[in-house]
Structures are given as C-alpha cells and as structure tokens.
Amino acid sequence: SGNGSHAIWQRLLTHLCVQTAESGTLRIYARLPLHTDELQIFKNVGFVEYGQEHFYQLDPSVDRMEVTSSLELRPQQAGDSWGLQKLYATFTPRAVQNAEGLAQGQWELAKRSWGEQGRRTGYVWEFDGEILGALHIRNGKRGYSIRTLLHPDALDKAEELCQAALQLTTAKPKFPVYFTFRHYEPGWPHILPILGFKPLTSQVLVTKPMAVRVREKSTKLIPALEATPTEGAASTTIMSHVRSEVHVTKNNIPRRKGKTTIPVL
C-alpha cells in the first residue's frame, strides 16, 4: 500500500541520516519532483525546502544557427571566482545561501557540482570591470544544459545573454537544449517563451543539516571572575569532521554522489 511504502522509505532515509552523521557528513541534499508524496516523506525525516528549479526546453524547430547576440562574453577564468560569488550573493536569498554553504563552488569550473555529468564550460560578461552576467553550458550525451547568473540591475540583458548561450550550442545543432533557473530569478518565465523555450518540469530543492550542537563544560576560567570560584562556562561546538555530502536521487534512492535529475543526462 502507499502508506506502507512511505513508512519503508522514511525508515530508509532515517537510517541514511544516521549513517552519514556518524561518518562526519555535514549536509544532505536532494532534488524532488513537485507536488508528490516524496516531499512530505523527506520533511518527516527533517529535510527543509530551500528552493525550486524550473527546466525549459528549446523547441526543436528553432534554428540556433540564425540566433544572434550583441553581448560580448569572454571565457571564464580562475580569477573570476570572487566576482562570481559577489554576483551570486547579489540576488540569491539569504536562506538559499545558508542552505548551500560555500556556493561559489557551483560556479568554479574546476569543481564539479553534485551529481554532475558532461563537459561544462563557462563565460562571463563584464561591464566597467565588474562581472554582471555569467553562464555555464554543460554538454552531455543527450543535449545542452544552460544555467545563468545575471545582476538585478542588468535584467534588460537577459534575452541577449540567453541568445549568446544558444550561439554556443551550434556545434551540435540537432542536440536538444535545456535552460534551468531558480524560483527567485526574475524574468525568465516571460523571456524564455519569446526565444522558443517551453516549460518542461520543475523540482524542489531540500536539505538536511547533519551538524549537531552540543553544550559542554569549559575548564577555562572566565577572566572577569578569575579571583573567585567559578562554575564551568557553557560553549557551543559543532560536531563535524569531514566536509562531504551525500545526495539522494529523484527516485529516492539514497547514495553518495548520486546522478543528477537534469533531463540532459
């Protein structure tokens, strides 16, 4: 029955959390389909929703060879990490930043995002020495996946940024093209249809922090009270050892470094 399978998955997730906590894992992430029972199962185990991702697919009838853009991009460099992190922090809600931790790693080409496959290339758009836009293109076995960053003051360049991305996918003109954006990135639901994209699917992003706060006695004397007998001063310690992550696939199969659910794979 449905309730029986839900109970089984809840026990499996609970066991996963216990095992990963014992190994020193700091956080577990999962991507889940919207409006399904899976989300409630994960919430019952302590997962918290922190965002949504929306996937659009380019209509195959669009001829990408005819797409043009006046936006001048350059290849992303290692020295762009700080500028990309500033751009990310400009429009990303604080709750999402806290959930994702050191988020600049998502936009460093040397690092692979969790569950990522395929070859990823990056480009940035600068104005007066400041990075105002960026895009990553991942070329997988089943198509291209586009992800962008755009400064809130440069939203009028969104269409050109997407067009520039499409120009970079012409090496394989028959491959499908997907575009991913987060719920807090404005404009894309209106701009993408103009360029020939259609809604495909959406996912909810959830996470469960595994660090445990423990109050313990301190043997050090409080300086202001050194001349008098003191009781132990309480302090807070985060119990964690290894900065690793365990991920759960869309089909709810817990495993380390699970495959992403992005359609291009």
Image (cartoon, grey):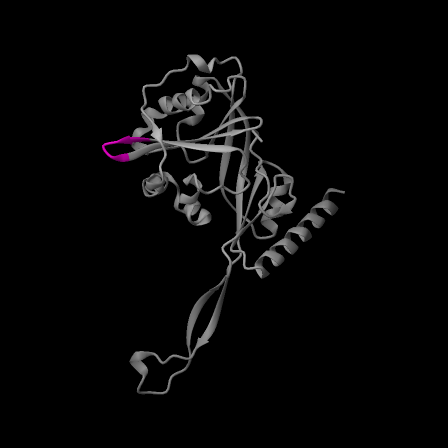
Q: Residue lying farthest bottom? A: 228
User: With respect to residue 54, does 64 lie above or below?
Assistant: above
Q: Is residue 66 left or right of residue 175?
A: left
Splitting the image into 4 quarters, where does residue 108 fall?
top left
Residue drawn at point x = 37 percent, y = 32 percent: 134
Judging depth in this view, the residue of 29 and 164 nearest the camera is 164
Q: Is residue 230 above or below residue 200?
A: below
> In the figure, is residue 226 to the left or right of 219?
left
Q: Is residue 90 visible?
A: no
**Could you tell me if residue 159 is visible in this image?**
yes
Residue segment shown in magenta: 125-130
Side (left or right) of 90 relative to 174: left
Tell which residue pokes out farthest to the left in this image.
128
Residue 106 image point, x, y percent:
44, 41
Residue 110 rendering spot, x and y as whole percentages: 44, 41
Residue 179 falls inside the magenta stretch? no
Q: Which quadrant is home to the C terminus?
A: top right
Residue 58 point in image, percent of width and height: 50, 20
216 up-or-down from 44: above or below = below
Magenta span: predominant SS is strand
Q: Residue at x 62, y 58 (%)?
A: 19
Would you identify the image quadrant in which residue 32 lies? top right
Residue drawn where x is 54% and y is 17% of the image: 174
Quarter of the image with the N terminus is top right
Of residues 102 and 89, the one nearer the viewer is 102
Extreme residue toward the right, this view: 1
Q: In the image, residue 81 lies at what x, y percent?
A: 35, 42
Instruction: Determine the residue positioned at 64% across, 43% down.
Output: 252
